[in-house]
């Protein structure tokens, strides 16, 4: 079956850079989303990748390698408000979203 | 504000009871998704509707049911409630049935507590 893997938790320092990885099964891949979710709040859209390469959007960038079944979210100039969970979601061969369990990012001053 | 409206925001009820959660999608969105999120857990997909028809079903319990009405709002019915049903229930909407046509917009969620 489909499986999305991402680290459970990461810690980084304010002002630094952090990379959150996501791996998925490559068969039937149709696209990938990254969402941010603060505790107790709704997930909000960050990025969408369907072709290989890097998509940059301000302090956040997302990368995709379809051949490797791999994506990462890169957060630069970390701010305390970036403390949140980051969810990776793949669009599978049935055009359904398969969600990872999320990576909880803790930012320390 | 995502444009997706969920009611009620909070609900406390007892085991064995039945509740209905309501979702109004963003204007123009035809697809509605329901998700369950227990404390510190990931999003569990329950069901998706597109333009009034069931499009996809996830791990939705038989005690749960949903529908999408002609005006595109959706309701999730949870019956014979158990303690383990306590969770945040999110509704999300998108333009098309295929997520590639646009991202999902999430409502603020309905927090259900079963005592």
Image: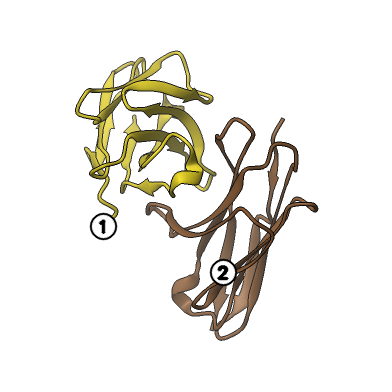
Chain colours: A brown, B yellow
The vertical placement of B55 against A88, above or below, is above
- Residue drawn at point x = 45 percent, y = 13 percent: B62
The x and y percentages for residue B63 are 41, 15
Give the residue number, with chain letter if any, for mark 2.
A106
Which quarter shows the C terminus of chain A? bottom right
CA–CA distance in space, label 1 to label 2: 25 Å
| Residue A44, image quadrant | bottom left
Horizontally, residue A13 falls left or right of residue B83, namely: right
Q: Residues within 10 Å of mark 1 (few under 14, many from 20)?
A: few
The x and y percentages for residue B14 are 30, 24
Q: Residues within 10 Å of mark 2 (few under 14, many from 20)?
A: some
Task: Please tell me which residue lies in front, A70 or A18.
Answer: A70
The vertical placement of A70 against B81, above or below, is below
The vertical placement of A95 against A17, above or below, is above
Judge depth for marks 1 and 2 and give the one in front. Answer: 1
Q: Examine the rendering and report whether any part of residue A101 can be seen.
A: no
Task: Please tell me which residue lies in front, A55 or B38.
Answer: A55
Q: Examine the rendering and report whether any part of residue A39 can be seen.
A: yes
Q: Secondary structure at mark 2?
A: strand
* Chain on which label 2 sits: A
- Residue drawn at point x = 57 percent, y = 79 percent: A76
Task: Please tell me which residue lies in front, B59 or A66.
Answer: A66
Horizontally, residue B51 falls left or right of residue A30, namely: left
* Chain on which label 1 sits: B
Q: Which mark is residue B1?
A: 1
Which quarter shows the N terminus of chain A? top right
The x and y percentages for residue A66 are 73, 52
- How many marks can you see? 2
- Residue drawn at point x = 36 percent, y = 15 percent: B80
Q: Secondary structure at mark 1?
A: loop
């Amino acid at each position: 079956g489909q499986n999305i893997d991402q680290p459970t938790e990461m810690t980084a320092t304010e002002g630094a850079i952090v990379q959150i990885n996501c791996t998925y099964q490559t068969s039937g891949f149709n696209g990938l989303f990254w969402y941010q979710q603060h505790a107790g709040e709704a997930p909000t859209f960050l990025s969408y990748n369907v072709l290989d390469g890097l998509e940059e959007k301000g302090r956040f960038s997302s990368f995709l390698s379809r051949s490797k079944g791999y994506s990462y979210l890169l957060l630069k100039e970390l701010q305390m408000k970036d403390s949140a969970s980051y969810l990776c979601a793949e669009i599978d061969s049935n055009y359904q979203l398969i969600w990872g369990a999320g990576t909880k990012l803790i930012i320390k001053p | 504000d995502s444009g997706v409206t969920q009611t009620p925001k909070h609900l406390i009820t007892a085991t064995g009871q039945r509740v209905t959660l309501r979702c109004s999608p963003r204007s123009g969105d035809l697809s509605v998704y329901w998700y369950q999120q227990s404390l510190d857990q990931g999003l569990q997909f329950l069901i998706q509707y597109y333009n009034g028809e069931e499009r996809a079903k996830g791990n939705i319990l038989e005690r749960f049911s949903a529908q999408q009405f002609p005006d595109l709002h959706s309701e999730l019915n949870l019956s014979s409630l158990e303690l383990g049903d306590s969770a945040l229930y999110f509704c999300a909407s998108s333009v098309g049935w295929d997520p590639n046509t646009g991202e999902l917009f999430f409502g603020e969620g309905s927090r259900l507590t079963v005592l």
